[in-house]
Image (tube, coloured by chain):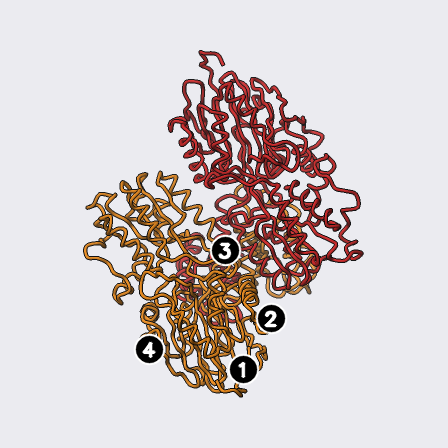
Chain colours: A red, B orange
Amino acid sequence: MKKENNEKMKIIPLGGLEAIGMNITAFEYEDSIIVVDCGLAFPTDDMLGIDLVIPDITYLQDNRDKVKGFIITHGHEDHIGALPYILKEMNIPIYTTKLTMGIIEHKLTEHNLMRSTRRKVVKHGQSINLGKFRIEFIKTNHSIQDASALAIYSPAGIVVHTGDFKVDYTPIFGDAIDLQRFAELGKKGVLALMSDSTNAIRPGFTASERTVGATFDHIFSEHQDSRLIIATFASNVDRVQQIINSANKYGRKVVVEGRSMVNIIGIASELGYLDIPENTLIEIDKLKNYPPEKTILITTGSQGESMAALSRMAAGIHRKITIQPSDTIIFSSSPIPGNEKSVSKIINELEQLGADVIFQDTHVSGHACAEELKLIYALVKPKYAIPVHGEYRHLKANSEIAKSIGIPKDNIFILQSGDVLQLGQEKAEVVDKVHTGGILVDGLGVGDVGNIVLRDRQHLAEDGILIVVLTLQKGTNQLLSGPDIVSRGFVYVRESESLMEEARQVMTNALDNCLTNKRADWNKIKLVVRDTMNDYIWKKTKRRPMIIPIIMDV
Amino acid sequence: MKKENNEKMKIIPLGGLEAIGMNITAFEYEDSIIVVDCGLAFPTDDMLGIDLVIPDITYLQDNRDKVKGFIITHGHEDHIGALPYILKEMNIPIYTTKLTMGIIEHKLTEHNLMRSTRRKVVKHGQSINLGKFRIEFIKTNHSIQDASALAIYSPAGIVVHTGDFKVDYTPIFGDAIDLQRFAELGKKGVLALMSDSTNAIRPGFTASERTVGATFDHIFSEHQDSRLIIATFASNVDRVQQIINSANKYGRKVVVEGRSMVNIIGIASELGYLDIPENTLIEIDKLKNYPPEKTILITTGSQGESMAALSRMAAGIHRKITIQPSDTIIFSSSPIPGNEKSVSKIINELEQLGADVIFQDTHVSGHACAEELKLIYALVKPKYAIPVHGEYRHLKANSEIAKSIGIPKDNIFILQSGDVLQLGQEKAEVVDKVHTGGILVDGLGVGDVGNIVLRDRQHLAEDGILIVVLTLQKGTNQLLSGPDIVSRGFVYVRESESLMEEARQVMTNALDNCLTNKRADWNKIKLVVRDTMNDYIWKKTKRRPMIIPIIMDV
């Protein structure tokens, strides 16, 4: 760092600051933009029928010539899931670590994007140059291997982005987080630290992944007469490794079940991130050749996802696995907020089938708690703190931690997506706001479902629909046919015949009055239909189904 | 108890054993039936648009002459909420404690049932005789005052029903749970114990309600410069009492906000269950006369309910209260499973308005944990254990506790709603199954929404609706008008004109083919419309909106 440095860079989060999900942040210096992560978000409860949400990248498209590449911190969906959609809009090279790239390439293959996408694998400790930026990848720990923090060098200074991380001194695979490098960077002088806020509201430290292994060993030794079925996150390869270690120690064969689990385990073992002893894995069809107590299943569905393997087993509709009273099922996970009820439902179903269910002490988080965040602040000693990755309350908690460690309040920025934070050695401020948002994906449609469609779906979900159809003589408005009333999702018509018949009568009377006025245009008629039905139905039922008047003319 | 007793009674749960909610249990001996509790359930996520669920009481209606009365254990909705609906079907007297009756009478008044319903207030320690039964009310502790356990005496033996309870040695109002009476009954000999399973999966003891008061005092002393807004359960009168105590100690005026909170506080103070010092409560409109730091609000909305007072404050749409950056908001509650995301949403909104939010250490449960359940088993020493009040996994955990305390496995019954458990001194067994179920209430409609309507609502919610209308010449099937396509909740039509136009074209072609066959009847035509549209739309969008063909004839 020169003593006099008036250079300025911009940080522009394009997502990820209103909720956990859809992480994507642009870093801009003069004619260069690099983009960190490109994640999707899962739909919120009010986004009925939506499959997933991807970020609006208008800002990147408006600055297409500047954009040098995607830098991906790790292979979770909220950091890579939007790549296939965005790459179809903009062809940008991808830089990331080996396992992360393996997972991305699986997606690119599915979307037929492998040939058109430039990709470069980077090792921890290495740097790449992109335009005016240099980006160094730093080893961290997380609930997926090969996660990276980034040191982003520009003439304006160094920004450190932790990615999603925890401090694990005893990780399962590879090294612990490179704390020395964080310290070195801190000594050099860091302009800003962007750190993971997910667990900032939790005091203390997150336990090491290794602690879960000890619990598995204990459970394996206590349940030597049961088949074990262990549900966990597909992407947590270290967890799978520990389950396989315990299985091996106790002489059990391992079946892997669930599409995403099979995918990730395939990628991870091919790339050398998973060490599976020979003759340990067996095909699900071979299970019958072994005594149940000499087998385990590792399966998807730990969040109660209704289509996942474990849900199908619990509901008794899995094609190959039937839950037995002698089975022990382990949830090696904790429910993501919003999934509590689905998880409970599956536990109930499994216990009703007579199985034992264990759902405690077999999971640790992948995110840093308050004391770990303090450690990183203390090593990096940034001038500015920018909490990232979380809902507002998580960002707020992280900013309180930054304050407690001595960063002045004015140097802490809780940004919103779209904020353009301009920062240099002397000053940091939000100077602009760019367009951002979520684009809804429903089936093949990207962006064709918006607020109006969602509002209609909510209305339909609440009280159903009443369709009123009539045919009029062209010109004279004489009623040739109808009004007919068709309903769905409103009442069970066969048991509400008198209600529906009276509604038709009320409608007929209202139309008689309206149609004698020959000048009544269709808009007028539709208004009468809608108002009459609304009033009648509300009076009778205190419900407000959607009313659709349809007029045909002949 | 006589030495030779071959008498038998029946216990028939009509709800409450598949989920938390809708508690209602019939006890039958010869020509006498008494019914313990009459609760509602809140709709599950798949019950779109439903307001609440009440139990199907076909069994009681089929045995109307036997039914002697409702015995109500306490005033929570899952124990009293269905009373107004059931009383309209069957006029049965109600027996319960004073506060519980006060809350019930508020409901009866709203439903215009006061005059027609016989009611008798019973004190703890008192018994009533109903047919062949005698029922003794026993003091317990819970998150609402005046909760009772019941000793139900019949010639076949004594059944103890705990109701919802915890063991609180230092309650806020009135006495601790009458453990001596449980012991006395145990000495006499108890046939069966039905105990609250809600917290059976939690180890240890539930903390005393009084511990929350100490936390309030601490928070009040630490936040002497803030207005305090405290959200809690309306029915937790002891909690409200402790908040008022702290307010009084720190010289603050108290505003009560939210309809249900105002109701319950009114009933409780009128009946002497709440001690509010003079000049403590003020009207919300008088708030402006006091400095904010000399006031507190007690409000509904601690579960993130979207229409409750706190949600409206957080969203900035409350008519009288505007959240200030100097406010401190306390959640004196923990989220009921399923409400986690709504609570998070409100915390985010409140913090974004600059307020501080406290959501830890200001709540204790009202239900007994594992060690308290063991205590009751140890005092009552029942021959049979019948876990009640919970999902299957809770009932299972309670049955494990019963087993651990020495009750033989064969004497523990995890029942399902509708099971008829016949029990005597020698034997207990499920001898029959009666019809039970949930009846859905939607607006004024009770039972007119069933599975078909719900399935339609789910379908509509997922992908919306496409309506295809055509007018045919009567007799000749000549197409006079249409096909017209109207959609809602499917795509934003203005931006999908070509899709909709092509759909119309595909439809027209398919109809041309179909209508040239003059013998095609309407069912055939409708089938063609549905299949053609389904295929086309799925191919184009991978969505399956509901397709409604409507044919008019002229």
| Quarter assignment of residue B526 | bottom right
Instruction: Please say if the residues under marks 4 and 1 sit with CB atoms less than 8 Å apart.
Output: no
Query: Does residue A518 appear in this view?
Result: no
User: For the residue marked with disc 2, what is the amino acid?
Assistant: Lys
Instruction: Please say if the residues under marks 3 and 4 sit with CB atoms less than 8 Å apart.
Output: no
Q: Which residue is mark 4?
A: B120
Q: Which residue is mark 1?
A: B424
The residue drawn where x is 62% and y is 43% is A444
Spatial separation of the CA atoms under disc 3 and disc 1: 52 Å
Question: Is A384 placed left or right of B256 in the picture?
Answer: right
Mark 3: few/some/many CA within 10 Å (<14, 14-19, 20+): many
Instruction: Please say if the residues under marks 2 and 1 sit with CB atoms less than 8 Å apart.
Output: no
Mark 4: few/some/many CA within 10 Å (<14, 14-19, 20+): few
Secondary structure, mark 4, is strand
User: Please, is residue B326 above or below residue B114 in the view?
Assistant: above
Residue B409 is labelled as 2
The mark closer to the camera, 3 or 2, is 2
Q: Position of residue B211 (x, y in %)?
A: 36, 54
Residue A460 is labelled as 3
